[in-house]
Image: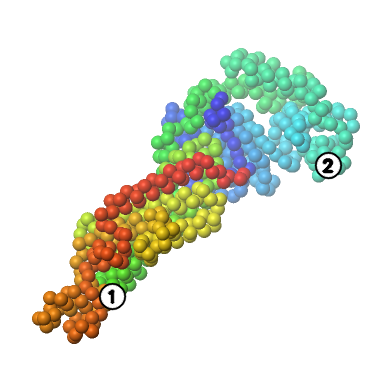
Amino acid sequence: PNPLTYKRLVGYVEQFGVHDKQSTVRESLEFSAGLRLPDHSLHRREEFVDEIMSLLELESIKDERTRSLSVEQNKRLTIAVELVSNPSVLFADEPTSGLDARAASIVMRSIQNVAKSGRTVICTIHQPSVSVFSVFDDLLLMKRGGQVVFFGELGDNCENLINYFESIPGTPKCPSNYNPATWMLEVIGAGTSRGKANATDYAAVYKTSKLCKLNEERLQYEFMAPLSADVPLQQTQYMFSPLGEDAHNYSQKSISGLATPMRRKVYNQKRQSGGHTLSSIETVYSQPFYKQIAYLLNRNLKNYWRSPEFSLSRIIVVVLVGAIITATFWQQKYRTAADTQSRIISISFMIMLTGAYNLFTIMPFQIEKRAVLFREISSGMYSSIAAVVSDGFVELPYLIVETLVGVNVVYWGIGFQQTVSAYIYYSITFFLYLYLMTSLGMFLSALLPDALSAQLSATVVIQIFQLFAGIIVPHDKLPSYYRWLYYFSAQRYSTEAIITTQFHGDHTKLCIPDGKPIETAPWIFKRFVVDKFCTSDGEFQGLGSFTGVVQTAEEFVYNSEGSFLHGYEYEHRYIDFAVLLTWCLGLRILTVITALTVDHNKR
């Protein structure tokens, strides 16, 4: 088959399986089966999952979260996740590593059950115990450099293996009650006593042996014979035996001895059940793109709901930050430059703090599940694009809740513009900035190798956004070589959009920098000073009593020469909206590109 579609024919059991921590055992199996079995087999998915759980003895822990499983249970779950895809071949990488004798026995019993179901199971294993080694039917033994020294049936009590090596001149006999696995490694110089190994080149011996010739004939026949061919059982029964037709002298008949008829049987079963066969595979993924997103979104929603330390904490922080800002500026009356500036700062701080919190919390959450994504994507469950798209969708309901809670706490508490249009524009802009910062966190999580480097990079970005947003340093005060950062700052567009809409048409009289507007004055001065200058008490006491000049809030903030936020324009509000949308879309696209091109998987 095509190399891209080959993964749909095989299952690979990792040495240390990783699974979604918030999913149950059954949910993990249903997720794998749903994405890896073709459409016409989904109607019996539940039944098939039940069969696999029974085969691997997982019924008693089907409702347990994967994060609470023991090492041995996790191994069996890893096997089951691959087995529900109904593969023809199952590869297992050191399935007994890290297990005690009892746990290793349970895992090997499960693997043996899989082999008895008619599937080919290939395991790599190092220094197995006698009980584990005796479970295997066939052995491919290689020495350093990947050279084959034995390939065939083990036989009863490893009789075939022992007879083969002992028949080679210069090979020491296997001691009585000695582990054959340990003995064979010592013989070829791969055991703990490699220095005592004899000088025999067992790889060269194997290449000239009758066993090698029989294996080559058998493999050629096995792969060249059509599946529909009627192969006599007697002919296939001895093909993989070291002694050929003399294999009837052995008391144990291996499963692999029936490889061709059993392979034909499994093939027919797969055709009936909707499993993958060579002729049925046409695409890389079993499920179309929209179904991949649906499965991922369903799992992500459950994960968010089951992870309140992440999802709920963001809402709580928004409420707390909003409550503190609201308590500080409760129903604020603004009459001076300082009052108005503090009102502007309250808007800026609310946007900056909530956006930063979303940014910093999403990165470790995303990086923590990276290993699971790499495993599932490499096994052909879904594409990287589907994973990125579903991550973006799952955030929407939570960001909407954050927006509704955060905006309503601050907006009415401080007393912003009491118009529907201003409120809606504030809410939409606030939501877009939260989504932008969350998307930025996802992008940095995909780009950088660990949470620490991602958070350090995020700190730099936040400082740039805040410093060059036009509030701390207005646009006209920035050095010319820094002004491009003013246009780069995403926070600038959100604050410009909110602040200009809040102060547009606001004719509140302000004293700049301080004082109260003069309300009365002698008739000779009245037309020149009333509502134009300020004094400490609002009374005209001579030309030397002025403490400031009168401006409307709109003029002071942005709509005059030398305004506080010079460069901000009310007419830019729709441009700001478009730029924020572009930022969000651009970050999602960058995340997709990064997911396709950057691989942090070091296993």
Q: Residue furthest right?
A: 170
- Residue 98 picture location, percent across and down: 67, 48
Give the quarter of the image for residue 415.
Answer: bottom left
- Pick whichever, 247 or 298, lies toward us: 298
- Residue 547 picture location, percent across and down: 25, 80
Labelled pair 1, 2 in contact (Cβ < 8 Å) = no
Quadrant in which the C terminus is drawn: top right
Q: Is residue 429 above or below residue 553?
A: above
| Mark 2 crowd level (few <14, some 14–19, many ≥20, 10 Å Cα) | few
Residue under the point 48% across and 37% down? 382
Residue under the point 79% across and 40% down? 190
Q: Which badge, 1 or 2, comes first in the chain's sequence? A: 2
Label 1: which residue? 513
- The residues bearing labels 1 and 2 have C-alpha atoms spaced at a distance of 88 Å
- Residue 53 picture location, percent across and down: 53, 39
Image check: 166 left or right of 598? right
Residue under the point 69% across and 46% down? 101
Quadrant in which the N terminus is drawn: top right
Give the label on residue 194, or none: 2
- Residue 458 picture location, percent across and down: 48, 57
Image check: 585 left or right of 384? left
| Mark 1 crowd level (few <14, some 14–19, many ≥20, 10 Å Cα) | some
- Pick whichever, 22 or 235, lies toward us: 22
- The secondary structure type at the circle numbered 2 is helix
Give the quarter of the image for residue 254.
Answer: top right
Give, as a three-letter code, the residue at label 1.
Pro
Comparing marks 1 and 2, which lies closer to the viewer? Answer: 1
Give, as a three-letter code, the residue at label 2.
Arg
Q: Residue furthest bottom?
A: 541
Q: Is residue 542 visible?
A: yes
- Pick whichever, 15 or 503, lies toward us: 503
